[in-house]
Amino acid sequence: MEINLVSDTVTKPTPEMLEFMFKADVGDDVYKQDPTVNALQRMVANIFGMEDALFFPSGTMANQAAIKLHTQPGEQLIADKYAHVFNYEGGGVSFNSGVSCNLLDGDRGMINSQQVESAINPPDFYHSPLTSLVCVENTTNKGGGACYDIAELQKIRQVCDKHNLKFHLDGARIWNALVAKRENPRLYGETFHTISVCLSKGLGAPIGSLLISDKETINKALRVRKILGGGMRQVGYMAAAGIYALQHHVGRLAEDHRRAKELAYILSQKNWVHKVEPVETNILIFTISPRINEAVFLDKLKQKNISISSMGQGKLRIVTHLDYREVMHSYVVETLQKLEL
Ligand SMILES: *Cc1c(COP(=O)(O)O)cnc(C)c1O
């Protein structure tokens, strides 16, 4: 039994999902003639109470398209220092949009409205880049699956409105936040100009993300997606996986969250663990004691068929997901409990 806790992207489609994909009605989506893609786009726009949505092959491309739509070359966006758009999108912010990032020192990947307000360059001071966009992540990836308070996001939106900025949500794991906080997705639809969501993380689809916004913005996004090479043909097979995932795999995220919390509790009891970050969703970040060699530790787990990832600087990461079942969880719990270093 191989147990892969490196990421929630390692899941494979379930037999039921594959069957649903197999039966999908498809067409050429570049001509907007794929009924399954159209259905998924309507479904996701409706969930957030927004006008329209556009299917993308990856979350990176959806974020990059949003940044392109909201900025002009030379301008600046505001984000947390851990932001995926800055750290893990290959420098696309500068490559695709010619934009710089003003990175804020937030709390576990989350920034607040005061920080945002003080990071805005005065528009009349033409020496500094013009601030035009604020990007936040919910849940945070590098921040350890932390969830924003919707009230704070609404305050950031007020700051954006006051200063004429656009507000983008990188919602790769928004489903986890919605389940953990029992929130209504429509509140997010009201708070952001654009939202990107992933189907290939906790929801277990093989690929797929969507960008959600008003009709005019999504119409412009269509051209940007084409430029980035993201126009796809009979992609309804993939959209079908997303529809299936939204219908069957959202509520169960609560199990991933429970298991991550249980693992966090066990780790917090071990003398070889230095620190365990708070767990709100399915990501668990911890630091092992400085007396223990990280590579040796990872290898020890590997010998017991458990893979987890290193984030550098002694930080390790466990991510629970759809393919991490209860039997595996019992085994990992027992293994960690017994582990002496
Ligand atoms: C995974 C992820 C993305 C998108 O990643 P892709 O692999 O391109 O789909 C974007 N933002 C965050 C926070 C993520 O975790």
Image: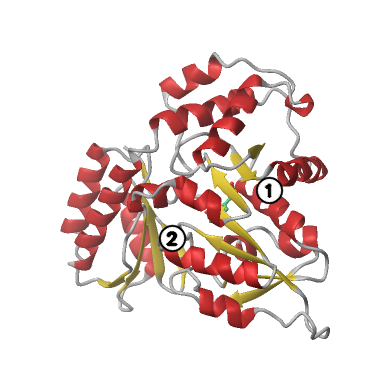
Q: Position of residue 254 (x, y in %)?
A: 30, 45
Whichever of callouts 2 and 1 sits on the residue coming sooner in the sequence is 1
Seen in the picture, residue 181 relative to 330 is either above or below; the reply is: below
Residue under pointer 2? 150
- Determine whether the residue tagged by mark 2 lies in a helix, strand or loop: helix
Does residue 269 appear in the picture of this structure? yes
- The image quadrant where one finds the C terminus is bottom left
- The image quadrant where one finds the N terminus is top left
Q: Is residue 293 left or right of residue 127?
A: left
Q: Position of residue 149 (x, y in %)?
A: 41, 63
Residue 233 location, quadrant:
top right
Residue at 77%, 28% in the rendered image? 30
Residue at 63%, 27% in the rendered image? 37
Judge depth for marks 2 and 1 and give the one in front: 2
Residue at 50%, 72% in the rendered image? 111
Does residue 79 appear in the picture of this structure? no
- Determine whether the residue tagged by mark 1 lies in a helix, strand or loop: helix
